Amino acid sequence: MIPLTLAEVAGAVDGRLLAADPAARVTGPVEFDSRKVSAGTLFVAFPGEKVDGHDYAAAAVEAGAVAVLGTRDVPGVPMVLVADALDAMGRLARAVVDRLPELTVIGLTGSSGKTTTKDLIAQLTVRLGPTVAPPGSFNNELGHPWTALRADPDTRFLVLEKGARGVGHVRYLCEVVPPRISVVLNVGVAHLGEFGSVENIALAKGELVESLPADGLAVLNADDPLVDAMAGRTRARVVRYGEAAHADVRAVDVTLDGRGRASYTLVTPEGSAPVRLGLTGRHQVSNSLAAAAVARELGMPLTELAAALGELGLVSTRRMDVFERPDGVTVIDDSYNANPASMAVALRALDGMRGGGRTLAVLGYMAELGPYERDGHLEVGRLTAGLGVDRLLVVGEPAAPIHEGATAVEDWGGESVLLTDQAAAVEMLRGELRPGDVVLVKGSRYRTWEVADALRVDATGEGAAA
Ligand SMILES: Nc1ncnc2c1ncn2[C@@H]1O[C@H](COP(=O)(O)OP(=O)(O)OP(=O)(O)O)[C@@H](O)[C@H]1O
Ligand SMILES: [Mg+2]
């Protein structure tokens, strides 16, 4: 963060100083977890349901916090008193980024692949200058200002994932930290439950390009018609990426190797160059093109860009994280989250990685699909069978329609089983897995990842079942 006096902080957030020295300087970071407080920190106290941050105010000051930003007075503690701490954090973030003229803010949204692509973009921008990006999927009204407040005068790029659970959310996040480059990846049915319709999802995602200034840049996926059409909703210049012929940054001649890694020719207005990704899954072509379009805009020369794309790695865990066990079993841990579109890309990657053994899919419930819930699960089951996956383990009763969808496919040579929980899946896999098998583990957070973790533990030998 840039150093600010408490008077400046109070001014930025419309706060009132209590028992605080207006000239005392906050040097950052801004933290809401008292265990992370160090000298110079501004501690933000949220009135939580279980834990009230104000109870930790004194401890935070003892640990070095300059003051506490909160909604009620804590006697003996220097306070910046505000009506709403989250809103205040947003305003403070805005005040900080407004004081950083050298900073380029890159925002991205989409139904699937935000965190993955945020990590790809940050891996490219860090080659061009100091970069700040949030850890994992910290993409909401808290993660946003928290991350932005980590930018300082040396920071050149701030890469922010913008999550949305309703119309207006992305617009709000863009007010907190206005992007100059906005990337929209795709519009799918993720969070359909909250949005009500795909049209609303497109409406919500498009807020990211609507909020751009005239000298900004909208980076749009030319392969997704709903995203492509967002060009009409921005004043900013538009650059399209994708495999479509009208894309400015394109991939042609895409091939996949036996481990599901894509190679392609990157075609840009400056020329073409070969790219060989180290990331697993056909969908990474699209994600890497989005990142390439951003880096190109920021001035990375084509040959350097193509080479850098080949060096991209995984940063956030449980997203197409492939590991091979000593017993010859390959595991694709994609257990962070799931919706029908991301299930499809993961299942296709599994299919593409088939080696000498079988393919197995351990699939869990997909949350937040609303009225599309049953159909979404049925569709994933049908696709699993349609792709000829050998063994399907459906985990948990709520995911049962996946099992139903798969077993309804008549000419499928594979087999599906509906299991009560993760432990049952782990037990079954331990008995069944053979060298050469490839296993995909995927579901909506919750506990599906316990299966991937158990397979990983088996791989290291620690605590493995006999
Ligand atoms: N471009 C893409 N299209 C479809 N699916 C994708 C794409 N990129 C990644 N995925 C799938 O989506 C999963 C989740 O990826 P990621 O965490 O990057 O998405 P997200 O949009 O950040 O999700 P969340 O809404 O939970 O923040 C991946 O593990 C992968 O299976
Ligand atoms: Mg995310």
Image: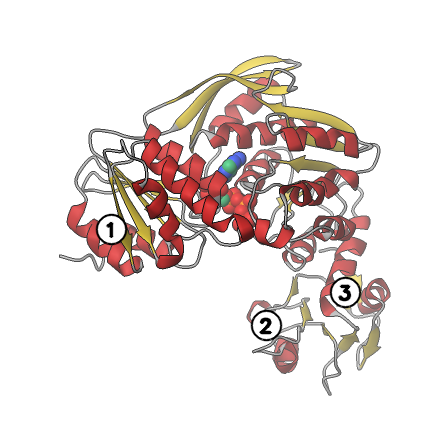
Q: Give the residue number, with chain letter if any, for mark 3.
A: 88
Task: Tell me: 206 left or right of 277.
Answer: right
What residue is shown at x 20% (from left), y 42% (from top)? 326
- Across and down, in percent, residue 79 comes to 76, 77
Q: Quadrant of residue 224?
A: top right
Q: Are marks 3 and 2 in contact (CB under 8 Å)?
A: no
Q: Residue furthest top?
A: 271
Mark 1 surroundings within 10 Å by alpha-carbon count, few (fewer than 14), some (14 through 19), many (20 or more): few
**Could you say where residue 278 lies in the image, as x and y percent from the top left?**
42, 30
Cα distance, mark 3 to mark 1?
A: 46 Å
**Rounded to the nearest whole Å, what is the CA distance between mark 3 and mark 2?**
18 Å
Q: Nearer the viewer, residue 162 or 195?
A: 195
Element on which disc 2 rests? helix
Depth check: give the residue in front, 240 or 132: 240
Most foreground residue, 372 or 425: 372
> In the displayed structure, would residue 317 be above or below residue 437?
below
